[in-house]
Amino acid sequence: MCLALYKKRKATNDELLKILLPLIDDSALDEDAIQDILLELRGISRSHSDIVSQALQRLLQRTLQSVDGHPVADKVLFALVMHMRTVPDHDTCINAIRAALDEVAACEGYNFDRTSQTEEAIRAVEAMIKAPDFDRKMLLLATSLARDTQNQTLLHAVLVALLDTLKVDGQEDGDQQKITLIRCMVRLVLQMMEEEGADLRRLVPILMSHLQAAHVVTSKVVKEGKELAFGNDLSWLWRSAYNAAVKGVGVWMENELTSMFGIASQLMEDSSAAALLEPETDIDSHRVIASFAHVAGQYFATRDQPQSSIRTLGLRTFTSEIDKLVTLAQKVMTSKENDQEEMKRMSHIARLGLIYKAEILSELQDWDGLINTLKSMEGMQYVLLTTYEAFADILWKNKECPVHVLYAGFETILRLSSDQGVMSVQKFSRWLRAICTILLSGGRDADRAKALAYTQQAIDLLKEHGDITDTESDQHYPDSERSWLLATAFNTGVQCTRSLQKPEAKEWFEVAIALCQFVAGSPRQKV
């Protein structure tokens, strides 16, 4: 009431202080009393800013001096900070806040109540940047407060607000400032994620959004052909993204892991494209692993979705991403051919990428693409027999696969596996049987001629491996396949005889006779 009368008759600063300071000194320290004082001071803050500053500092001192005042000290501290942001003199503002924080730090038994004040502080920061008289120095002040009180949530909100102001300023060094801020935010979020009981469901998406923002900035700089002045920051960012994803395996949601590895790969690509000299020596290897994890995660997620045009489009996109992945893996293998561990890792990823691509193309019924992918493997020394076997299974199991595609696929598999020296006699026998079955089912002379040539090739192989009796060996020609070859050659010769194609019949019978020596108990004399 007394303060209201002084305000009504426009009292001087000295007169207001004479009523305010005793009021503060004699006031109770419960929440209601403190709230009343703060409301009174807010009412005169515009007309008597200096007086309010002194009064709030006096009130803070009083609440800190008494244990009874500790529960409300945080409200007074927050009110002081929010008031000081309106002071035009930035140095005065900073000094006042620093003095207040020093008093807080020196007070034993007092802890800043982060939980109750953080949300209110964040709302105040958001309102601050929307104010017409906004000054970025006020955000720097809020940053100091958050850091000194070790309030990571508030500090993060202030840094986000600072980044938002940079997005609209258009300063010449704005990109550098953005990356610096983003790095600070990423480091802060990573620290928050390490705390016991951290809310990963909330923090992981925040971390990804900051790293994605870094990619947006750097990709723009690269596209514009500008010199990247924050290469070290970018290196730190992609490593942080990659390490966070690796650490999140088995902990994060699968879609989060997939996205984080994708972001890490993007940042690595930006770093390589913007490198002033040679890219970092290990960046391509890490990029292959990150890209593979990203593509594989997306592929598995899409594969389980119901049929739709969006799903089909997504699958087609994966084929081009796999091509990039395989090309990059081959680049690493070329540059690190003396590193056996790296070669083993990269070749395994490349093989899996080729198999995933074959599965996708088979599902899309892109038969030309599948056969071309198979043919492109010619000369790839890292391709193993299991890779060709996977392609054969993919072709054989798809009931929609046309016969001519099946034949072309098995023929290519047979040729490449033989040329590259990775052929298994057991696999060869089964693939040859599939090819001959397809050829002979058509009943055409040209197809039978091809089947005859393959059968003769089988005889050559039997001459070399026919005496291997260990049925577990890959080089053993299975007895069932030998018997099938003999029966097929003899029956085809009989068919040719009936159709009066005697020269061809003679060739088939000669093949059957040659096969008899490799088939136990065969009726050689009858043949």
Image (spheres, rainbow, N blue to C red):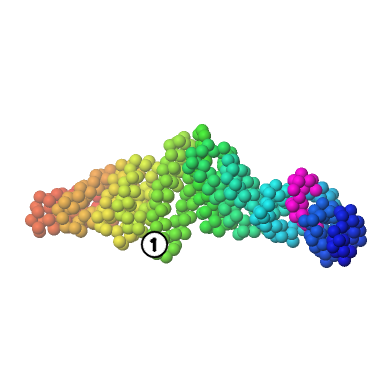
Quarter of the image with the N terminus is bottom right
If the image is split into quadrants, where does the C terminus sit?
bottom left
| Residue drawn where x is 38% and y is 45% of the image | 383
In this view, the residue in front, 500 or 102, is: 102
Q: Which residue reaches farthest top?
A: 277
Q: Secondary structure at mark 1?
A: helix
Residue 95 visible in the picture: yes
Residue 31 as seen in the image, left or right of residue 515: right
- State the predominant SS element of the stretch in magenta: helix
User: How many numbered tags mark residues here?
Assistant: 1
The one nearer the camera, 266 or 485, is 266
**Image-based side of 361 in relation to 222, left or right:** left
The residue carrying mark 1 is 309
Residue visible at 44% across and 63% down in the picture = 305
> What is the x, y in percent for residue 135?
68, 49
Quadrant of res 41: bottom right
Residue 356 visible, this orientation = no
Is residue 451 shown above or below 276? below
Residue found 77% across the figure and 48% down from its top: 93
Quadrant assignment, res 464: top left
Residue 335's image quarter?
A: top left
What kind of residue is marked 1? Answer: Ser
Start and end of the magenta stretch? 74-96
Percent position (x, y) of residue 99?
82, 47
- Disc 1 crowd, CA 10 A, few/some/many (<14, 14-19, 20+): few
Query: 448 or 32: nearer the eye?
Result: 32
88 part of magenta stretch:
yes
